């Protein structure tokens, strides 16, 4: 889809809409937690992470496959569990090139803040 200018524009717009969805979901989640709509058991597994591993394209493709299969497995397992709730799960995998050509720091300056 990203091979044409129109496709790239669509993907870019869709990604930004997902970020807006994340922001709205985070606000709702925080309101729900503050209002006590969820029990203590939801505190630990809820969260956001911004990891920056070094992966090959093949490993990244494998990662998506593993995540997809595991999510299908867990969704099927919890389908009839009355404790199950809707969970917003946004994932991203965006390879980043070094900031400058010839830059030997493959980590990049943004790595310091990653957690």
Image: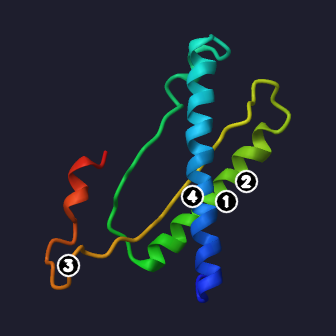
Q: Is residue 113 above or below residue 85?
A: below
Q: Which mark is residue 16?
A: 4
Residue to which mark 2 is pinned: 72
Asked if marks 3 and 1 touch (Cβ < 8 Å), the reply is no
Single out the mark in the foreground, 2 or 4: 4
User: Label 3 vs label 4: CA separation?
Assistant: 25 Å
Q: Are marks 2 and 1 in contact (CB under 8 Å)?
A: yes
Q: Earlier in the sequence, mark 2 or mark 4?
A: 4
Q: Secondary structure at mark 1?
A: helix
Residue at image point 62% right, 55% down: 17
Secondary structure category for the residue under label 2: helix
**Residue 89 higher or lower than 11, as above or below:** above
Q: Earlier in the sequence, mark 3 or mark 1?
A: 1
| Figure quadrant of the N terminus | bottom right
- Of tags 3 and 1, which is closer to the observer? 3
Which is nearer the N-term, disc 4 or disc 1? 4
Residue at 75% x, 45% y is 75
Binning the other alpha carbons within 10 Å of mark 1 as few (below 14), some (14 to 19) or many (20 upward) gives: few
First in sequence, mark 2 or 3: give its number: 2
Within the image, what quadrant is residue 97 found in? bottom left
- Disc 3 crowd, CA 10 A, few/some/many (<14, 14-19, 20+): few
């Amino acid at each position: 889809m990203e091979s044409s200018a129109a496709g790239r524009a669509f993907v870019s717009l869709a990604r930004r809409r997902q970020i807006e969805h994340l922001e709205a979901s985070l606000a709702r989640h925080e309101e729900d937690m503050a209002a006590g709509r969820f029990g203590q058991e939801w505190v630990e597994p809820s969260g956001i992470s911004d990891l920056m591993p070094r992966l090959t394209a093949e490993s990244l493709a494998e990662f998506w496959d593993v995540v997809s299969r595991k999510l299908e497995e867990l969704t099927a397992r919890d389908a009839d569990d009355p404790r199950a709730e809707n969970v917003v799960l946004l994932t991203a995998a965006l390879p980043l090139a070094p900031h400058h050509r010839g830059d030997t720091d493959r980590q990049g300056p943004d790595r310091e803040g990653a957690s």
